[in-house]
Image: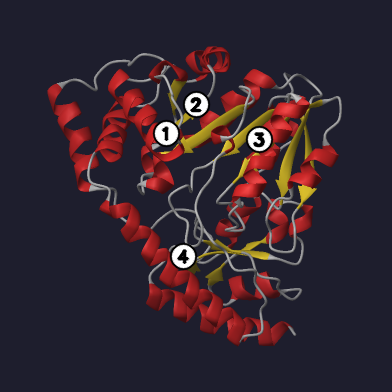
Amino acid sequence: MTGFSSRVERISISGIREVFEAAGDDAINLGLGQPDFPTPSHARQAAVDAIESGRADGYTPNKGIESLREAIAAKHRRDQGIDLDPEDVIATSGASEALHIALAAHVETGDEVIIPDPGFVSYDALTKLVDGTPVPVGLRDDLTLDPAAVEEAITEDTAAFVVNSPANPTGAVASEADVREFARIADDHDVLCLSDEVYEYTVFEGEHHSPIEYAETDNVVVVNSCSKLYSMTGWRLGWVIGSHERIERMVRVHQYAQACASAPAQFAAEAALTGPQEIVDEMTESFRRRRDILLDGLAAHDLECPTPRGAFYAMPAVPEGFVAECIARGVIIVPGEAFGEHGKGLARISYATDEETLRDALDIMGEAAAAVR
């Protein structure tokens, strides 16, 4: 009988999914990583119009429709101040595919990829799927990634390092000084900096900075997506940008694995990027209020938590047994070790839920904390 590849045997179902499957149907879900806002109506309508007119019936160019890539290039010129050719953009099936093709195009068998720990679950798994070796690097006490720790971890086998700001699962936002250092490290060591910026617009204090703004070489590739920027997780529309040479290698993987991103989603994404932007500020302000509610509630129950400055996650230190007790009482949160060994003793809480439900969940978390202490 045909067996299974060593690549697939190196990965397993994520700890996030395991938590969801263990919870009851009526549980309060603070484990879900998606905004609780509707997709902007003009984006939905653009997809409908494209479908009804027949423009979404066929394949698009591998890199995506030109008008979408122009909109993405304009977004990066506006937000990062970079001169981006639309030919150096690939529209992908979500940021997940963008991460996958970036790693597949740059990582040889046995190459090392430095990843934050705790960090987004896909970094470890996708590295293994391309036969690379993940090299986890622990975070500072404030849960930001220290450029010095990244630089120290670089060896002659390092192909890339991953930067994620604002970060999942921590909500941490890298400072401008740190981002400049990430760019310098990519330049000085001639290694790829893969910058995951899908929470770019959800920053509460300070500003978002991208390594591509500061790099002097082409050693930075940026992944982004409409999923979190415009509450379009189900549309599965992301993108990757980089130098022409890097994009041409990534599109080789993309054309065989995906051919093109969903056509209706491409028209919706173009409308989201070029249409009214009020939803961005609305979501950010709402998440800011909920973050403050969460931090106040955690403090009231003596649960210490670094202040998240972006995204919609917090990662408090929790007593042993706390996550299981919360789940048993009907509140889903995710154990920190699902995001790496350095996550042990922490838990990820998503506050992408309404304020009343969040307060109810905090009451239950307080009871759970008292029960396990």
Residue beneath disc 1: 76
Say which of marks 3 and 2 sits in front: 3
> In the shown orientation, is residue 341 left or right of residue 92?
right
> In the shown orientation, is residue 278 left or right of residue 52?
right
Asked whether 120 or 7 is in front, the reply is: 120
Marks 1 & 2, CB-CB < 8 Å contact: yes
Amino acid carrying mark 4 in the image: Asp
Numbered badge on residue 183: 3
Who's the residue at 52% across and 34% down the image?
223
Which image quarter is the N terminus in? top right
Residue beneath disc 2: 241
Q: Quadrant of residue 317?
A: bottom right
Measured as percent of width and height from the top left, residue 4 is found at: 72, 25
Q: Could you tell me how far apart the alpha carbons at marks 3 and 2 are, in whole angstroms?
A: 15 Å
Amino acid carrying mark 3 in the image: Ala
Measured as percent of width and height from the top left, residue 109 is found at: 78, 20
Who's the residue at 52% across and 29% down the image?
98
